[in-house]
Image: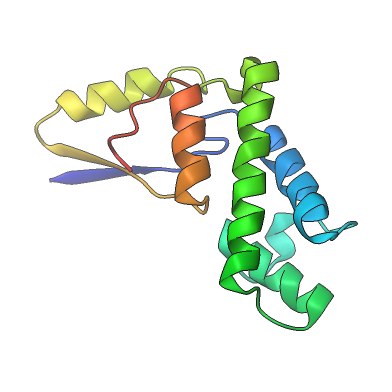
């Protein structure tokens, strides 16, 4: 058995730019955090939750409370949804991604998975917007 694991942003969907933009705007709107470093590779953990934790620790000296995290996530996903409604091309599939996934899923000796640093809600939104089968998540 062979396993193929795919990321979402930049691998299956062309959503890096819109994801970055909405992430930064949501932090500003939900928690008045501005001027963050968007070079995500410089963070100790390059996942949505890891970056958020780091930003909270730097700005507030503590971890986010569940309510604060929930507020940020809702704001972020809402902004992504709004961006999709106003400019769906920002959520395009990377050319050939669906073809590759579907071909691998038809092969009996291949298993396909999606591994991402996104929150589940934003990951599912991006896959749905790009018309990529999200049953792998």
Q: Residue at x 65, y 45 (%)?
A: 76
Q: Nearer the viewer, residue 48 or 77?
A: 77
Residue 12 position, x and y percent, is 47, 31
Q: Is residue 15 visible?
A: no
Residue furthest to the front in view is: 67
Q: Nearer the viewer, residue 11 or 48?
A: 48
Q: Nearer the viewer, residue 116 or 74?
A: 74
Q: Residue at x 40, y 50 (%)?
A: 115
Q: Residue at x 66, y 78 (%)?
A: 63
Residue furthest to the left in view is: 108
Residue 77 position, x and y percent, is 60, 41
14 left or right, relative to 120: right
Looking at the image, is 108 positioned above or below residue 39?
A: above
70 left or right, relative to 61: left
Looking at the image, is 64 positioned above or below residue 52?
A: below
Q: Nearer the viewer, residue 124 or 78?
A: 78
Q: Is residue 29 visible?
A: yes
* Quadrant in the picture for residue 99: top left
Residue furthest to the bottom in view is: 61
Looking at the image, is 111 positioned above or below residue 84?
A: below
């Amino acid at each position: 058995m062979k396993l193929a694991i795919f990321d979402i942003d930049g691998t299956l969907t062309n959503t890096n730019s819109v994801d970055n933009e909405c992430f930064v705007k949501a932090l500003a709107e939900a928690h008045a955090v501005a001027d963050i470093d968007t070079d995500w590779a410089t963070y100790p953990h390059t996942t949505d939750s890891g970056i958020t934790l780091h930003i909270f620790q730097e700005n507030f000296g503590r971890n986010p409370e569940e309510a604060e995290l929930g507020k940020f996530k809702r704001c972020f996903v809402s902004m992504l949804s709004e961006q999709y409604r106003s400019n769906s091309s920002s959520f395009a599939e990377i050319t050939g991604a669906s073809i590759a996934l579907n071909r691998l899923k038809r092969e009996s000796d291949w298993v396909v998975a999606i591994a991402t640093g996104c929150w589940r809600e934003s990951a599912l939104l991006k896959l749905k917007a790009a018309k990529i089968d999200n049953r792998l998540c």
